[in-house]
Image (cartoon, grey):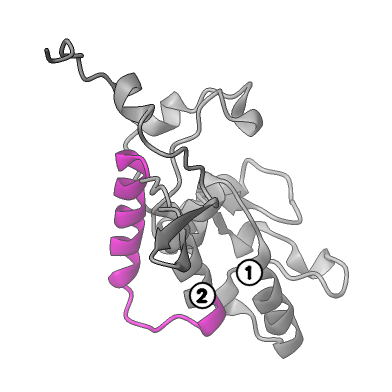
Amino acid sequence: QHPPPTALTSQSISSCLPKLTPGSKTRLRTGKARVFTQSPTLAILSDPRVLQLAETLEDSLQSSSSAPLPPLQKLRDISSQSLLSTPWPSRKDEPFRFTDTSFIKNSDIEPISPSKSQSLAPVLSDTLLPLNITILDGYVVDSLSQLSELPDGVFVGGLSSITSEATMKRVSECVPNFQGDLFWLLNGVGA
């Protein structure tokens, strides 16, 4: 007599397979030699919205004709690579526990050029008090900022406008070491 057939379920199949955890090593015996293999790495793909935003930012940068400085290109490359495995944050993520990002996720986000944000400066200059730094749509507005009143050694501006070699060296050292969230990475791609 044959044993009664059993249904194939994920539990019955998994009970026959070795338990693998990321980073664990599996030992295979081939004859008398022992072979150790690394377990397969689980790939985490980014959220489609994250990829769409990154692509939009990258496309807007390709329209500029000048080649970026090496630290700026490095920042863009590191950010682009990291975004491939970055999910959209949810309230389950500790840093966003009290933040609802669904409004941002569902918004139509388009890059803006620095010239458009600078064109609003005359309108705003009549209504604002003088400030040390005025940032509009992510760009420093020089005409509304009093950068000369900042302490010595303080730099405010885009990476492409750094003229000091010491400042450029310091920024270049910090760029690859920073571990930011999704929004830091998106800013890095669009820098």
Q: Position of residue 42 (x, y in %)?
A: 41, 47
Please name whichever residue, 64 or 79, is drawn nearer the observer in this view of the structure.
Answer: 79
Please name the residue shown 71% across and 89% down the image. 165
Residue type at the position of mark 1: Val
Task: Check whether the beta carbons of the residues at disc 2 and disc 1 lie within 8 A of each other.
Answer: yes
Residue type at the position of mark 2: Lys
Q: In the rendered image of this protein, does residue 137 appear above or below residue 91?
A: below
Residue hosting label 2: 74
Please name whichever residue, 90 or 127, is drawn nearer the observer in this view of the structure.
Answer: 90
Residue hosting label 1: 175
Please name the residue shown 55% across and 23% down the image. 91
Is 19 left or right of 14, judged from the image as shown? right
Q: Position of residue 3 (x, y in %)?
A: 18, 13
Query: Residue 39 in magenta?
Result: no
- Measured Cα–Cα span from mark 2 to mark 1: 8 Å
Query: Residue 62 in magenta?
Result: yes
Residue 33 got which mark? none
Residue 190 visible, this angle: no
Name the main secondary structure of what is drawn in magenta. Answer: helix
Please name the residue shown 55% across and 52% down the image. 23
Please give the range of residues in magenta: 46-71
